[in-house]
Amino acid sequence: MPNWFLGKIRYQQPIDDSNVGSRKDEFIKQKTITEAYLVDAVSYTDAEARLYQEIAANTPDFEITNITRMKLADVFYHDDGGETWFKVKAVFITDDEKTGKQKKTPSVMLVNAETPKQAYERVELSLKTALDPFEITDVNTTKILEIFPYTEESESTIVDEQTGEVTNHRPSAQWAQLKDGLRKARSIANTMVKGLAKEGISVSVKGPGESEYQQLKDG
């Protein structure tokens, strides 16, 4: 099941304006561009890694300003229409057996379309097979430019030679977990070096990160 995160980025774009005072000013003046993307990821760290992976090719100099989890019941993508993504809210109506009253459960979906009307109709058509009656209550335009779901190309298949078990691994997720592990290991090592330094014990650390450990030991 997809786990969606909304990522926002920011970068500087030169202003192409021939009316600017001098030619030198044309290259100096820049405007700030903000964009939003939706990415399927296993964690916030994985979402950050996937954003850099997907966006860096077309937008090399950017910074991620915010990542938030976006709870979605479904995402409907149509090849034949619409670069605009709409957030559609539907309310499913069921009968509560205990109270005998109707229970309304909201559900939020995304769909690409040309107009709000088309977004409404596409979601309505997609939900026709739903078992419970529903009504669409809201259709809102989002600022999402593109959506990055996980695909078969995004995953690698690994076969355990002993058990024959087949598992799918998400590369960026593995990288994110590795970075987290290294960060924790470095933190533990730093704490140990500081403690030994207080006891007057000299510690020599070799390998990657040696300069950082040495500074902590000396301090």
Image (cartoon, rainbow, N blue to C red):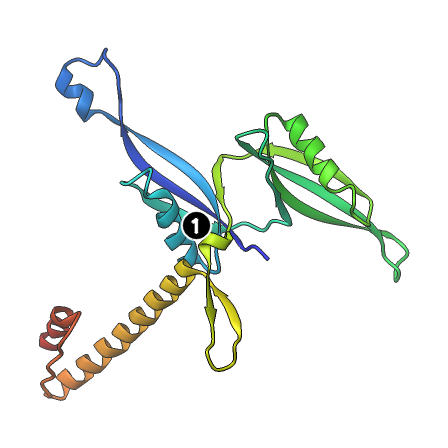
The residue located at (89%, 60%) in the rendering is 97
Residue 181 position in % (x across, y down): 34, 71
Q: How many marks?
A: 1
Taking 179 as reference, is 201 above or below it? Answer: below
Q: In this view, does 213 lie to the left or right of 187?
A: left
Q: What residue type is labelled 1?
A: Ile
The quadrant of the picture occupied by the N terminus is bottom right
Q: Identify the image quadrant of residue 174.
A: bottom left
Question: What residue occupies the far top of the structure in this picture?
Answer: 19
Is 147 above or below relative to 101? above
Q: Nearer the viewer, residue 111 or 134?
A: 111
Kindly identify the residue that appears in the image at 51 percent across and 69 percent down. 167
Secondary structure under the numbered disc 1 in the rendered image:
strand
Q: Residue drawn at (39%, 66%), measured in percent from left and top?
A: 177
The furthest residue to the right: 100
In terms of depth relative to the viewer, which is nearer, 13 or 52? 52
Is 61 left or right of 169, judged from the image as shown?
Answer: left
Return the residue nearer the eye: 79 or 112.
79
The residue shown at (21%, 14%) is 20
> Where in the figure is residue 189, as x and y percent of width and height?
23, 78
Q: Residue under circle 1? A: 67
Q: Can you give x and y, in whole percent of width and height, for residue 139 in the image? A: 65, 33
Report crowding for label 1: few under 14, some 14 to 19, many 20 or more residues within 10 A (C-alpha): many
